[in-house]
Image (tube, rainbow, N blue to C red):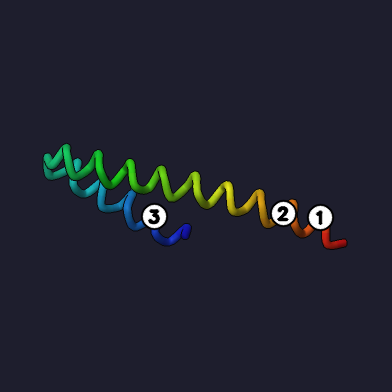
Amino acid sequence: MIRLIVIFLIIALIAAIFGFGGIAEGAADIAQIIFYIFLVLLVIALISRLFRR
């Protein structure tokens, strides 16, 4: 998931440099959503690991 976040951020940066604001905004939004999903899954995994022990 981290790889996807980095890919979308790079796409957003390149699009912003070349002046494609809409594409850059969309890629940044997707990266942000994936990042939040990653954080939620990380917290769930950590909590479940605590309860297993």
Mark 1 to mark 2 CA distance (whole Å): 6 Å
Residue at 75% over, 56% down: 48
Report the amino acid beneath label 1. Answer: Leu
Q: Nearer the viewer, residue 7 or 36?
A: 36
Which quarter of the rendered picture does the C terminus lie within? bottom right
Q: Position of residue 47 (x, y in %)?
A: 74, 51
Discs 3, 2 touching: Cβ within 8 Å: no
* In the displayed structure image, the side of residue 16 where residue 36 appears, left or right: right
Q: Dot 2 corresponds to which residue? A: 46
Q: Position of residue 14 (x, y in %)?
A: 21, 49
* In the displayed structure image, the side of residue 23 where residue 27 appears, left or right: right
Residue at 33% over, 41% down: 29
Q: Dot 3 corresponds to which residue? A: 6
Q: In the rendered picture of this protein, how many numbered marks are placed on residues?
A: 3
- Mark carried by residue 27: none
**Quadrant in the rendering for residue 49:** bottom right
* In the displayed structure image, the side of residue 4 where residue 16 appears, left or right: left
Answer with mark 3 or mark 2, whichever residue precedes in sequence.
3
Mark nearer the viewer, 3 or 2: 2
Mark 1 lies on a secondary structure that is: helix
Report the amino acid beneath label 3. Answer: Val
Q: Dot 1 corresponds to which residue? A: 50
**Quadrant in the rendering for residue 17:** top left
Mark 3 lies on a secondary structure that is: helix
Q: Position of residue 20 (x, y in %)?
A: 13, 42
Discs 1, 2 touching: Cβ within 8 Å: yes
Mark 3 to mark 2 CA distance (whole Å): 23 Å
Mark 2 lies on a secondary structure that is: helix
